[in-house]
């Protein structure tokens, strides 16, 4: 159980613990409700209090984050590079061909199975999930509060993609709503009924057949980058689901190479980079000749 400590300043004197946690510390409503039903989850100067009780300047408030258990099968044989780790978050460099969560065809070869082996049955929370065949940086909240703050604040994500053809505009914004409401299709699509979706891009090289692109999604829809580039007639290489060819690479050529965000507890600005995996690196060398 994670302990978070807050020194109450004059500006928060007399506030209800609920309002302080909810609006000053970014605790989610669901987490506060869970804390209400967890004995001694809030201590003010060592004395248990309720979320409706008032805090006072000069006091020390300790909040204990109650967590559920994870029931994923541990697999100690998996390997994932760790870029950062502390009590609140873990940042991994996810390899190609590794799903985040188990499914019918992937029971024990996922990020979840790796975390179960590394952290036991502690529940973990993925922030900004990556598809199985997309490589790069992925952030895990080690408790629900960290995950909620990261999800709310977003941060910056930058991808490298390799698309088919030569882009008519070397830089631009794709603004087209995406609908993922039909799970039977296992794919997303452009539709007026979809959610607002915006992708900013910049071409960084082309050989006349393929184009390497730096991509910064401004929203986080399912398969957003893949859907948007297919929509403008330039599907990602290797992305059969959205019309790409397997001639040059055997999976969608998409890599999350950079992330920048505030630490959910300390507020420190963190930035991480990940090198291209070998299959995309080889394609990049051909494009940039």
Image (cartoon, rainbow, N blue to C red):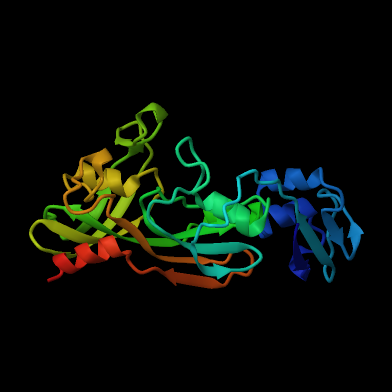
Residue 84 rendering spot, x and y as whole percentages:
54, 69
Residue 149, visible in the rendered structure: no
Question: Residue 119 appears in which quarter of the rendering?
Answer: bottom right
Residue 109 rendering spot, x and y as whole percentages:
49, 49
Position of 125 relative to 231 (above/below): below
Residue 212, visible in the rendered structure: yes
Question: Which residue is situated farthest in the front direction here?
Answer: 77
Horizontal arrangement in the rendering, residue 37 relative to residue 200 (left or right) = right
Which quarter shows the C terminus? bottom left
Residue in the picture at 26% in, 66% down: 281
Position of 121 relative to 81 (above/below): above
Residue in the picture at 76% in, 67% down: 6
Residue in the picture at 47% in, 42% down: 106
From the viewer's side, name the closer residue of 17 and 86: 86
Number of numbered markers: 0
Residue in the picture at 68% in, 50% down: 121
Question: Residue 64 appears in which quarter of the rendering?
Answer: bottom right
Residue 179 rendering spot, x and y as whole percentages:
36, 35
Horizontal arrangement in the rendering, residue 229 relative to residue 151 (left or right) = left
Horizontal arrangement in the rendering, residue 94 relative to residue 223 (left or right) = right
From the viewer's side, name the closer residue of 58 and 161: 161
Which quarter shows the N terminus? bottom right
Horizontal arrangement in the rendering, residue 66 relative to residue 243 (left or right) = right
Question: Residue 61 appears in which quarter of the rendering?
Answer: bottom right
Question: Which residue is situated farthest in the left direction here?
Answer: 208
Residue 221 rendering spot, x and y as whole percentages:
39, 44
From the viewer's side, name the closer residue of 136 and 110: 110
């Amino acid at each position: 159980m994670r302990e978070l400590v807050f020194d109450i300043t004059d500006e928060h004197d007399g506030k209800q613990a609920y309002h302080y946690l909810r609006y000053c510390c970014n605790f989610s409503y669901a987490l506060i409700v869970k804390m209400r039903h967890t004995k001694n989850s809030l201590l003010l100067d060592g004395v248990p209090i309720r979320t409706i009780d008032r805090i006072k300047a000069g006091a020390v408030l300790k909040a204990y984050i109650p967590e559920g258990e994870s029931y994923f099968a541990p697999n100690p044989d998996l390997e994932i590079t760790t870029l950062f780790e502390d009590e609140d978050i873990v940042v991994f460099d996810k390899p190609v061909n590794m799903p985040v969560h188990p499914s019918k065809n992937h029971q024990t070869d996922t990020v979840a199975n790796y975390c179960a082996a590394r952290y036991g049955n502690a529940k973990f929370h993925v922030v900004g999930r990556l598809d199985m065949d997309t490589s790069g940086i992925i952030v895990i909240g080690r408790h629900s509060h960290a995950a909620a703050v990261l999800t709310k604040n977003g941060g910056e994500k930058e991808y490298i993609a390799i698309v088919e053809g030569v882009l008519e505009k070397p830089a631009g914004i794709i603004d087209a709503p995406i609908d993922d409401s039909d799970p039977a299709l296992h794919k997303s699509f452009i539709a007026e009924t979809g959610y607002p979706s915006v992708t900013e891009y910049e071409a960084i090289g082309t050989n006349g057949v393929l184009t390497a692109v730096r991509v910064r999604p401004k929203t986080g829809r399912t398969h957003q980058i893949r859907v948007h580039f297919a929509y403008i007639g330039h599907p990602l290489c290797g992305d059969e689901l959205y019309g790409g060819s397997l001639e040059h690479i055997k999976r969608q050529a998409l890599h999350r190479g950079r992330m920048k965000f505030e630490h959910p507890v300390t507020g420190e600005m963190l930035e991480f980079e990940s090198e291209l995996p070998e299959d995309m690196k080889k394609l990049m060398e051909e494009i940039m000749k």
